[in-house]
Image (tube, rainbow, N blue to C red):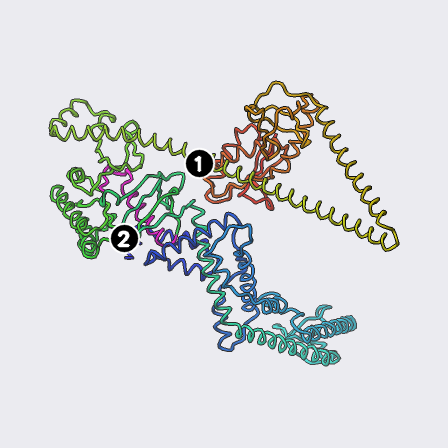
Amino acid sequence: MNQRALRILEFNKIRDKVKKYAVTSGGKELVEELVPYESVYDVKNALEETKEAYDLIINKGNPPFEGLHDIREGLERAKKGGTLSAGQLLLVGNMLRCSRTVKEYLGRKEEEQSYPKLEDLGYILSPINSLESEIERAIISEEEVSDRASSSLHNIRRSLKEKISSVREKINSIVRSNAKYLQDAIYTMRGDRYVLPVKSEYKGLVPGLVHDLSSTGATFFIEPMSLVNINNDIKELKLKEEAEIERILLELSRKVKENAEILSSNMKILLKIDFIFAKGKYSSGIRGIMPEVNENGEFNLIDARHPLIEVKEAVSSDMYLGETFTALMITGPNTGGKTVTLKTIGLTHLMAMSGLLICAKEGSSISFYKEVYADIGDEQSIEQSLSTFSSHLTNIVEVIKYADKDSLALFDELGAGTDPTEGAALAISIIETLKERGTKIIATTHYSELKGYALRTSGVENASVEFDIETLRPTYRLLIGIPGKSNAFEISKRLGLDNSVIEKAKEHMSQDNIQFEDLIRDLQEKSIKANKDARDAEKLRIQAQTEKRNYEEKLKRLEISRDKAYKEARQEAKEIIARAKDEADEILKAMRELEKLGISGGGRKRLEEERTKLKDSLEDRENSILKERENSGELIEKVSLGMEAFLPSLNQRVIIITMPDNKGEVQVEAGIMKINVKLKDLRKGENTPKSKEKKKKRELKLNLKAVESKVDLRGLDAEEACYIADKYLDEACMSNLGEVAIVHGKGTGVLRQAINNMLKRHPHAKSYRLGVYGEGGDGVTMVELK
């Protein structure tokens, strides 16, 4: 990809934003090197990786990269046989811990969604638990080695503490006995030796070794002779401590060297995962989607917006090319959004071809272009004596030289900067030349000749940026299929220019031009209305899809519950059969014991008779209970849909959901099951206030189990999130929940603002606030229910 297009379309700014999300310096380096990939396979693979990272962040939160740093420099030192410092070993230990936790994070449980690209990377990670444990046990901080690193170090430090304690007791005693000879009644240190600050006139009265002299010469720092041997012992122990620490660091460095290949591989994979998740976090921040990718030169961007413009300020538009036309001519007034449209199309393709999700709606598609050329902006050079026209033409020459059927060319103000007639003719020639090669072209212009050229030429389409005559302001929305109108007469009239002046101006225009402009105005008004209707229809479609998805999820949950109930019933039946079999075996065993004791066959017959009696007794009791149930209620004479009834055979309340058929059967809903029963087998349900109250309490109890104390809205757009939050608050209020959490994430703050606006007027919300530490912070809104 040519660097000029990357610079003009400001791809470097996208990279800078992505780089902020990388954790390691190596991950930031990979982002800094990010450019569009050179094959469709690589583009699709990178997009899938980013989408998986995006979904994982929503479902599992951020990956556990805590403490991860680039250890490549330390590994190179270890490979050469060098000894790593405690700080370098600590980073190696952190990397090993991160390898283990990231592998667990990317691992998939049975019920979880699969993320094949990232799971493959996680599978390659090879934690070294033994080395991780050794480093964790040995290294406390960048400067300190733990006593647990070795038994020798532990013993040395214990002896050192005892010696230091002993020398302090002794020197305190010496200080007290020689206080009159000292500048201050304290001891101090000189070169790891305990010394006394003796006045110069008394230096001969305190026997010992002189280690230092104050700058004024008034104080001698003398080590008492009685402490020399103890100080020597302390010095010797410290040297042993340093030697043991050096041995421990050398031993750990040797083990790092032995595992250098695995560590290097783990570091490389972690850097790539960090890079992928940086793209995922950025894509989450811009609410990006993964587009479809094709190679036929066509693209269709639905509600696309420029990624560098704030979401609140950006205006989205549908942008497409390639199906019926390969060249698009965009016209319209200055500051109307033509250049932004060009940059949006170009930058969106650069982002997608670099593996970044794009700012558009689901269903959007991009085309893989081997080159994107951009001639945008005024780059005239005084030093090179280039005018605006010369500068543009120099760039266009390069485009014409290299562009082919796999290229996208973006031209801003094509043919501008020279005589309008010649400029328009030159622009048409340039478009024709590139069009013959199959190059996809999008150009902006003010020339009316190019509007006419687009109208009469196959494969070339007009487009314009919308302009509101009433407010005299552009809407920045792109309208494909309609040439732009200058609106000079309407704007002049609104600004107060006399009608006679405007009429005289119209006399200087040809009748064809006036009719053409009027035709454009009519088409624009119809298009504005059509676009508004289309946008309203799209909103309704999204709402219908949401409702459909919710009902499908509800049906799926019901089916799961039903299957679970059937499974539990089958399991219970198996257990009953097993218990009955065990009881039968016990009876047979008892009978065999009786036979062994000499009881004849008549005894067996008697036992069989007793068993039959018991069985008949149980069946009679069950039938009598069922008869009591059937006779206890009143028969149903008049049936209405939704009425409650009692089914004695199941000992359960049911709801009648169909009218009786010609066989006298109705369909009833018993819990999650729907069954057909005879109307005569049903009895009237109890409708007393007491029974209703009991039923209500039971339902509330069930709701308390079903409704969670929080709802997660991350990844949804504002409209869908508000709908789900409103429905959730209704359910939470019915379940008598006092306070609930609405998880919307931090992101750009758009979703949080939408939720807060909804809560201001919500009938169930008593008060609301942002979450505090431990509740989710700014990513959660806590709502107190009435």
Disc with the residue nearer the chain's start (1 vs 2)? 2
Locate residue 454, reporting x and y percent. 18, 40
Task: Pick the quarter of the image with the N terminus.
Answer: bottom left
Q: Position of residue 140 (x, y in %)?
A: 62, 66
Q: Residues within 10 Å of mark 1 (few under 14, many from 20)?
A: few
Horizontal relation, residue 729 to residue 577: left or right: left
Task: Name the side, left or right, on which 365 lies relative to 389.
Answer: right
Q: Which residue is mark 2?
A: 372
Q: Secondary structure at mark 1?
A: helix
Residue 341 on the magenta span = yes
**Circle 2 Cα neighbour tier, 10 Å, few/some/many (<14 / 14–19 / ≥20):** many
The kind of secondary structure element at disc 2 is strand
Of residues 422 and 713, the one drawn nearer to the viewer in this rendering: 713
Q: Is residue 366 above or below residue 616?
A: below
Tell me where the magenta segment starts and ends, as one range.
Answer: 328-355
For the point 26% across and 38% down, the residue is 480
Q: Is residue 364 magenta?
A: no
Q: Is residue 188 above or below residue 436?
A: below
Location of residue 640 (image quadrant): top right
Give x and y (percent) for residue 732: 59, 34
Instruction: Residue 545: give its label.
Output: 1
How many numbered dots are placed on residues in this image?
A: 2
Please, what is the three-letter code of the amino acid marked with disc 2?
Val
